[in-house]
Amino acid sequence: FSHLPYLLKMERVLQDEMMMDVFNPVQHNSSNVMPQMISEATVPLLILTSLLVIIWNCGTKPSVPGPSFWIGVGPLLSYIRFLWTGIGNASNYYNEKYGDIVRVWINGEETLIISRSSAAYYVMKHGHYVSRFGSKHGLQCLGMNENGIIFNNNPSSWKQIRTFFMKALTGPGLQRALAVSVESTKNHLNSFDEVTNFNTHVDVLKLMRLITLDIANKLFLRVSLQEKEIVSKIKNYFEAWQVLILKPSPFFKFARLYKKYEAYVQDLQHSIEDLVQKKQQKLSEDEILEENIDFASDLIFAQGRGDLTAENVQQCLLEMLIAGPDTMSVTLFYMLMLVAQHPDIEQKIMEEIHAITGESEIQNSDLQEFRILENFINESMRYQPVVDFIMRKALKDDVIDGYYVKKGTNIILNLGHMHKFELFPKPNEFSLDNFEKTVSLFF
Ligand code: HEM
């Protein structure tokens, strides 16, 4: 690079000389015909070359906007930003600075941050973006490397494991969710004092965590568990996830840096191991009827057939128990906050609930009639999302919205940013008007 100014200068001198040749052929000795022939041929050649360059530039895909590579400083700075400010903040920063499709680097790997709906839709709909990305050591420490579903970066293992989740989260499993949720909520509201400090303040987030864990247990595992203990272990596991997911390999050379998080992960893993053993014991004692086969039994039977390993069973159960509770509890907490801040909306929701259910217990068939409630849920998750990005990897070369994407490129779909800058009539306001009409061209 230190040669660059010199080379540029030389190029300019040569160009100047060439132009002199082109426009001042008379300066040459007229008895020497060769230079004159060259200069006569140069004009059409230059024009032809320029045309070819223009055509070439039109034909190739534009490069993705983003910070400059500049002798490797660009990749270093963008990685530091991700580690320092977190994935969500760093993604927002780059989308605001460079536009809705940006190229940065994470751990030296090219990474696209996408907050344009057409491109996000494209990624979500195509099978060669199913793989997740994250630091290999980080994922290993979390037990997620090529295991479980949420961050499984091995597409064939992810596909096989996904069938168990699909079965549990659709059909009869989904039908049962309403009654189970009503029962769990009622039970926990009846023991309110457990989450009330000094008889005055209700720890609403804790209450939501207990309810959602209880729902997950009743739907997917069905053994007795120490709710409060597991809730606090899930919280720690998520803290470990946030800290470890992008960390570079050298970080894992210093045990004292990650020991605490490793202990958090192992703590939850041990509890899940105990729960799997309890479930195995129960299965060996109970009569096996179709209605007894829940998610956990399905996994245990698959292990018995040799389709899954014991590590698969444990990690799947761990992820099913954390996937719902940690996301749902915070989402519900935000929703309750938004209801409290918007009494007019609360009134509308209550009127709709009374109009649809009257005095009777809510039924599955009622659910599709709750238009206002549905708008409220969508708008809450848009305005105050609990997870605002998705992390994927390109499994083959591709073109996204006109930009060439190399196999192996990391993709961050910055949905939180997209929902504040595209598609909605009042993007920065909490308003049910945002979901009054069918929202988008793509979703
Ligand atoms: C507000 C609540 C929730 C939010 C915001 C949320 C968010 C997410 C996100 C961002 C992903 C990654 C998606 C991807 O890369 O494509 C994910 C995956 C997943 N979530 Fe949730 N989630 C929520 C509730 C739940 C619940 C209640 C369950 C189960 C009971 C659940 C089970 C899963 C599963 C199994 C996956 C992996 C899906 C796959 O790889 O195909 N989630 N969730």
Image (cartoon, rainbow, N blue to C red):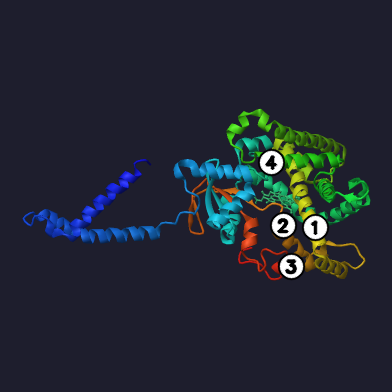
Quick check: marks 2 and 4 in contact, CB under 8 Å? Answer: no
Percent x, y for residue 417?
Answer: 63, 57
The answer for how far apart the CA atoms under marks 2 and 4 are is: 21 Å
The answer for how far apart the CA atoms under marks 3 and 2 are is: 13 Å
Q: Residue at x 31, y 59 (%)?
A: 52
Q: Could you classify mark 3 by the number of other residues whose Cα lies within 10 Å: few (under 14), some (14-19), or many (20 or more)?
A: some
> Does the Cβ of the disc 3 residue fall within 8 Å of ligand 1?
no
Query: Tag 1, which secondary structure?
Result: helix
The residue where tag 4 is placed is: 241
Tell which of 308 and 43 is nearer to you.
43
Quick check: marks 2 and 1 in contact, CB under 8 Å? Answer: yes
Query: Tag 3, which secondary structure?
Result: helix
The answer for how far apart the CA atoms under marks 3 and 1 are is: 15 Å
Percent x, y for residue 115?
Answer: 59, 57
Does 306 appear above or below 393? above
Disc assigned to residue 337: 1
149 left or right of 50 in image: right
Query: Tag 4, which secondary structure?
Result: helix
**Amino acid type shown at disc 3:** Leu
**Amino acid type shown at disc 1:** Met
Quick check: marks 3 and 4 in contact, CB under 8 Å? Answer: no
Tell which of 303 and 101 is nearer to you.
101
The residue where tag 3 is placed is: 432
Q: Residue at x 62, y 43 (%)?
A: 84
Query: Tag 2, which secondary structure?
Result: loop
Q: Earlier in the sequence, mark 3 or mark 2?
A: 2
Q: Earlier in the sequence, mark 3 or mark 1?
A: 1
**Amino acid type shown at disc 2:** Gln
The residue where tag 2 is placed is: 384
